Amino acid sequence: MTQIPQITAPADLLADKIILVTGATGGFGKAAALALASHGATVVLLARNLRLVEALYDEIEQAGYPLPAIYPMNLEGASEHDYAELANNIESQLGRLDGLLHCAAMLGTPTLFAQSDAETWYKVHQVNLHAPYLLTRACLPLLDKSENASIVFMADDKTGAYWDAYQVSKQGLVAMAGLLAREYAGGSLKVNCYNPGKTRTALQLRAYPAANDNDELPLPAAHADAFLYLMSDDCADNGEMFTPA
């Protein structure tokens, strides 16, 4: 694993960059979207709840950051055609992508493998693994148009027993990231993972509702510098698993 370096990000660090963030109204997604926009990026806000994503749009606009784009989509039910249409819309309106940050995730129901539910298994894999696969594949031509593009997959270290589909889907995501990184090694596209560790998000609180340290966990905004670094031209790494500084 590689630690995120300590950075002092200038206000224009991501000026003119176009970055798509999935799960943009969730804990990590919202923190990332605000951080990226505050440093000059035009952020494509992908989330399923239109009301929440419109509220985030207003927050970014009122702060005076570059106007974002809104793309409501429910990853649980999206098809291959929906991702192709998304890529076509981004190309026609924005021309390219410089970054793709996968923050959307579904916990499912941690349980014994023998007692796992097939419907939940499919849904969790759809959001955590199949959606990133389909979206990334659809967006690769847009990322190829960038002089310095970055894809970041959010990883997790829940590797013990009972995590069922969540653990398997997240491990599959890391494997897919490694595959992409090896295929694009030496080119203009960087592919990395970021494992933020225990953070006070809705998913973490559902996973550990009775944990004594929940109130002491860092908030998603504590990872802002990590998102800035990984989406900036300062990050030359490829195929790494990053952790907080």
Image: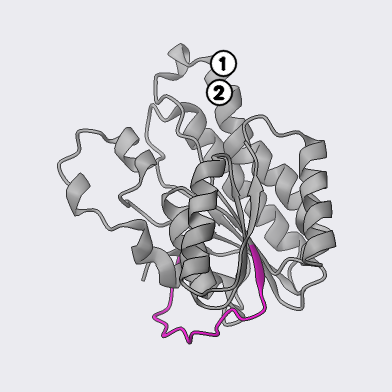
Towards the viewer: 93 or 27: 93
Indicate whether residue 105 is drawn in magenta.
Answer: no
Q: Position of residue 156 (x, y in %)?
A: 44, 47
Indicate whether residue 17 is drawn in magenta.
Answer: yes
Identify the residue shown where x is 79% and y is 50%: 138
- Side (left or right) of 37 relative to 81: left
**Separation of residues labelled 2 and 1 (CA atoms):** 5 Å
Towards the viewer: 218 or 25: 25
Q: Position of residue 139 (x, y in %)?
A: 77, 55
- Side (left or right) of 52 relative to 119: left
Camera sees residue 201: yes
State which quarter of the image contains the C terminus: bottom left
The residue carrying mark 2 is 121
- Side (left or right) of 132 relative to 106: right
Identify the residue shown where x is 60% and y is 32%: 125
In the current view of this chain or complex, which residue is farthest to the left?
212
Amino acid bearing label 1: Ala
Span highlighted in magenta in the image: 1-19
Camera sees residue 3: no
As drawn, the label of residue 118 is: 1
- Callout 2–callout 1 Cβ contact below 8 Å: yes
Towards the viewer: 163 or 201: 201
Q: Quadrant of residue 128?
A: top right
Amino acid bearing label 2: Trp
